[in-house]
Image (cartoon, helix red, strand yellow):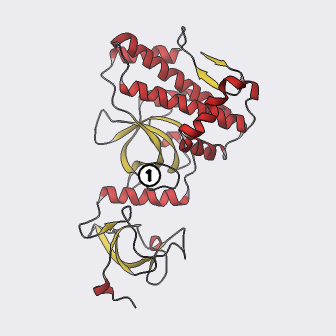
Amino acid sequence: MFHLASFDEIAGVTHGIEVTNPSMVARIRRAADSLNRCEIAARLAQAITEAADAAHTRDFEEAQFGEASADAIVDCEYYEELVSAWSLVAAEHQLITPEASSHTTGRSTDPSPFQRRTTSMLANSAPALSASHGYGIIMHHRLAWWLVEFPDLDATPLRARKLSGRLTSALADWLRSERGDPRLGDDVAALNPDSRCWSGEFSTVPSRADTDVFDLDAHPWGSDAGELETRLARTMIDATLHPVPTGFISVFTALPPENQPVLAIRLSGYTCAIFELLTARHMPTYRPRSSWRDISNDAVGDSGADIIGWQLATDWIRPI
C-alpha cells in the first residue's frame, strides 16, 4: 500500500508541506512536543491509514460514478497533506532515516477489511453528508459539547459548532479497535476521557438525527488547549448561543481603547436575565492572560462569564 522512497526523491514533498500548509505543520509540531517517540510513530501510522482509506473511497467513487465527489477529493488531499506533515515531524524526531523519510500513498489491489467495509457502506448507504475539516478546540460548555474552529494557533476563532455529542460509526469503530475495547461508547467524551477541553484536527458531519448539530467524523491528533485559545473558545460559544445585542460591538470585531472604562456585556449566570452589564476595562498590557478587568482591577472572569461585547459609554461612566 505504501512504499519508501529515497530522500532525494521525496525531499521536495516533506519540505514542501511547510510552504503549502505551514499552519498544519505548526499545529502538528506543537502536538508532537507533548508526545513520546512511540506516540508520534502511531500518529504517523494513523495518518497513513486515513490517507489510504480516503484514496480508496475516491477510487471507488471514480469507478462507480465516473468522477469522485468534492468531499472525497478534499478528504484525499487533506489526509495526503497530513501524512506529509507527520512524516516531516517524524523525521525531525529522528524516527525516519534520511534515506527513507517520507510516505506516499499507493493504491492497494488487496483492500483491507476497513476498506472493504467502507466500499460496502458507500454502495448501500444514503448519500454522504458534507464533511468539514480543520483545526479547533473541543469543549464541554453550557451543558453541551462544542467544536470551536480556528484558522491558526491563538488566532481569532471562526465559528462555534454545536455537537451532538456522538461520534460517527466509522470513528467509533476505529476508536474501539484502537483501544481494544469493543464495549467503548460512541460519545465524544470517549475520545479523551480525562479532559473536557482539548485542541486538535477534527472532521465533522451534520448529524443524521438533527442537522442543526454535528457528529465528529475524524480526529487525527489532539493536544492540550492553550489558555488563550480556551478563553476565546468559551467566548465564541457564548456569543453563538446569544449574539451580541444591537448597540454593542463584538469582541471579535474590535476591542476598546486600552485602559478606558466601557460598558461591557456578558452572559448572566442567573435565570432572571440573559445578559449582565458591567463597567470594565480592557488591559492587555497590564494583564495579557486575563485582559478584561472590572473597575476594582479584578479579572472579569473571576466573577462570571467572559465579555462578549462592549460599547463606549462616556456620558454614563464619565471616566476621569
Position of residue 207 relative to residue 245, above or below, is: above
44 horizontally vs 291: left or right: right
Instruction: Find residue 115 and report its horizontal and vertical position in percent.
Output: 49, 16
Q: Which residue is mark 1?
A: 140
31 horizontally vs 64: left or right: right
Callout 1 secondary element: strand
Q: Is residue 179 visible?
A: no
Residue found at x 50% / y 49%: 152
Residue 210 versus residue 65: which sits nearer the camera?
65
Examine the image and state in which quarter residue 265 appears. bottom left
Total numbered badges shown on the rendered structure: 1
84 horizontally vs 157: left or right: right
Residue found at x 44% / y 51%: 140
Instruction: Find residue 137 and report its horizontal and vertical position in percent.
Output: 48, 49
Instruction: Find residue 33 and report its horizontal and vertical position in percent.
Output: 67, 46
Residue found at x 71% / y 25%: 8
Residue 310 versus residue 164: which sits nearer the camera?
310
> Quick one: which residue is furthest to the bottom in this view?
320
Give amino acid for label 1.
His
Residue 297 versus residue 167: which sits nearer the camera?
297
> Quick one: which residue is furthest to the top in this view?
109
Examine the image and state in which quarter residue 27 appears. top right
